[in-house]
Amino acid sequence: MKAIAINSFGGPEVVECVELPEPKVGPDAVLVRVKAVGVNPVDREIREGGPAAVFDVVFPVVPGWDLAGVVERVGPSVTEYRAGDEVIGCVRKDWVQHGTYAELVAAPVRTLARKPAALSWAQAGGLPLAGLTAYQGVHGALAPRPGETVLIHAAAGGVGSLASQLAVATGARVIGTAGPHNHAYLRGLGVEPVAHGEGLVARVRELAPEGVDAAFDLVGGAALAASRELVADPARIVSTTDPAVRGFGGRYLFARPDAADLAALAALADAGRLTVNVAATFPLAQAASAQQLNAEGRTRGKIVLTVD
């Protein structure tokens, strides 16, 4: 099968398109023929060696945690799926080796849910990790109530745009930071946009003089510091990028694969309450270019690899 792999840590030059054996399928796993793969910052971080501090890494490494595809066959104990089922998955394992940048992926059933019919393959491929991060941050950690005000940093990005939709759907008022070119997009999601950067606290207080009830930080650093000034209860500050949040009573979030949460996201998509904006698609062979675009941090929504 065709796959993208790296044999050492480094820059885009270490990314290769290779032929690898078809993966083995365990008793509680299914073999998925991949249609689309979401590109996430962690994919580039794996390539550069960052996660090696917390995950065992076995070369050659196939990057990628997201997928959308069709079940080819199932392991002997699997009753949840059958060949031909369309699925999405956040197929993160306990070590880094067998990722989803490939034509075929062996995925444990605990990492999968049925693909939402309302989403295209590209949209479905971009949903799992970003969607789980947004869902577990908004519904699991912040739990906004109707009428509360939530601040979301980088609200137009892959995670931020999904978190914005989820927070709006709870009945909360959502203020989102983004560059001016993304303000109209955020208004279309029901979000009140503010420019990020210096002076952010003052700009947010122009909209919410008493501050906000909760903040979802997808940036870290100055954005997290601004959240501390704007949120009265630090327990209602969640960051996905800066573990320093724990030092003042907030929560650091590292999204977990969860079949029930994926199914909830799929149901929201099919109900018309959640969609995935695909900023760009690349063929699998151009994975390095897709990672470079993702690293720029300027895209609106998700970057996705398509697999023929």
Image (cartoon, helix red, strand yellow):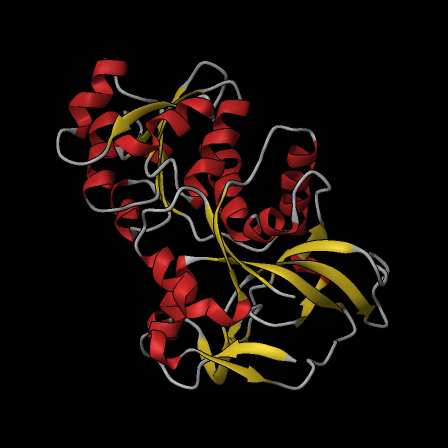
> Which residue: 59% across, 53% down?
125
Q: Quadrant of the N terminus?
A: bottom right
Q: Position of residue 127 (x, y in %)?
A: 56, 48
Q: Position of residue 278 (x, y in %)?
A: 51, 45
Location of residue 8 by image quarter = bottom left
Location of residue 218 by image quarter = top left
Q: How many numbered tags mark residues here? A: 0
Name the side, left or right, on which 57 lies relative to 244: right
Q: Is residue 143 visible?
A: no
Closer to the camera, 202 or 242?
202
> Which residue: 29% across, 45% down?
219
Q: Is residue 97 above or below residue 34?
A: below
> Which residue: 58% across, 55% down?
257
Name the side, left or right, on which 42 lies relative to 125: left
Q: Is residue 168 above or below residue 250?
A: above
Name the side, left or right, on which 237 lies relative to 277: left
Q: Position of residue 60 (x, y in %)?
A: 49, 85
Q: Quadrant of the C terminus?
A: bottom right
Q: Is residue 138 above or below residue 120?
A: above
Name the side, left or right, on which 132 lies relative to 188: right
Going by the picture, which residue comes out furthest to the left? Answer: 198
Q: Position of residue 36 (x, y in %)?
A: 61, 59
Closer to the camera, 141 or 46?
46
> Which residue: 69% across, 36% down?
267
